[in-house]
Image (spheres, rainbow, N blue to C red):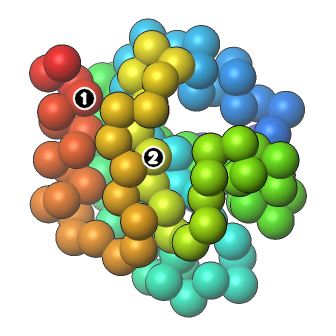
């Protein structure tokens, strides 16, 4: 899997291992390469991934390459950021969001 900055790109085959079976919180960026807002959000997520290194994970999943997962998690609009902890969704941010809002969601997941 490729890495873009601190954000690890995963595929459907990696989702369980990289997101659902880990102890630390995981922020999943459900995105598509053709999505302008998704591209605009990428630098913010790269920075956040660096800030959270060792405490939480930030991964991205291309919804075009994983339509079944997008359906399973009811991803109807992108970008869609979903925070998982212990394999369960604990927060969701749809659309553009500030770095502060995203970091706040991750801090809540870390504190819970």
Quadrant occupied by the C terminus: top left
Mark 2, residue position: 82
Few, some or many residues within 10 Å of mark 1 (<14, 14–19, 20+) = some
Nearest to the observer: residue 84 or residue 38 = 84
15 over 77 or under it: above or below:
above
Q: Is residue 46 visible?
A: no
Q: Which residue is pictured at 35% across the width and 32% down the height? A: 90
Nearest to the observer: residue 2 or residue 28 = 28
Q: Position of residue 40 (x, y in %)?
A: 44, 82
Q: Position of residue 73 (x, y in %)?
A: 62, 45
Few, some or many residues within 10 Å of mark 2 (<14, 14–19, 20+) = many
Mark 1, residue position: 109
Residue 41 placement: quadrant:
bottom left
Q: Is residue 40 left or right of residue 32?
A: left
User: Could you give the CA–CA distance between mark 2 and mark 1, rounded to whole angstroms?
Assistant: 11 Å
Instruction: Report how many numbered discs are placed on residues in the image.
Output: 2
Quadrant occupied by the N terminus: top right
102 over 41 or under it: above or below:
above
Q: Which residue is pictured at 36% across the width and 58% down the height? A: 93
Q: Earlier in the sequence, mark 2 or mark 1?
A: 2
Q: Which residue is pictured at 38% across the width and 50% down the height? A: 92
- Badge 2 marks a residue whose secondary structure is strand
């Amino acid at each position: 899997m490729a890495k873009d900055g601190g954000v690890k790109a995963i595929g459907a085959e990696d989702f369980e291992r990289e997101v659902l079976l880990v102890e630390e919180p995981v922020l999943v960026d459900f995105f598509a390469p053709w999505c302008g807002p998704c591209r605009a959000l990428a630098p913010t997520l790269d920075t956040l991934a660096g800030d959270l290194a060792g405490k939480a994970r930030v991964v991205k999943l291309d919804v075009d390459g994983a339509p079944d997962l997008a359906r399973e998690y009811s991803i109807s609009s992108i970008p869609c950021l979903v925070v998982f902890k212990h394999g369960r969704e604990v927060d969701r941010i749809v659309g553009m969001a500030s770095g502060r809002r995203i970091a706040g969601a991750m801090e809540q997941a870390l504190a819970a």
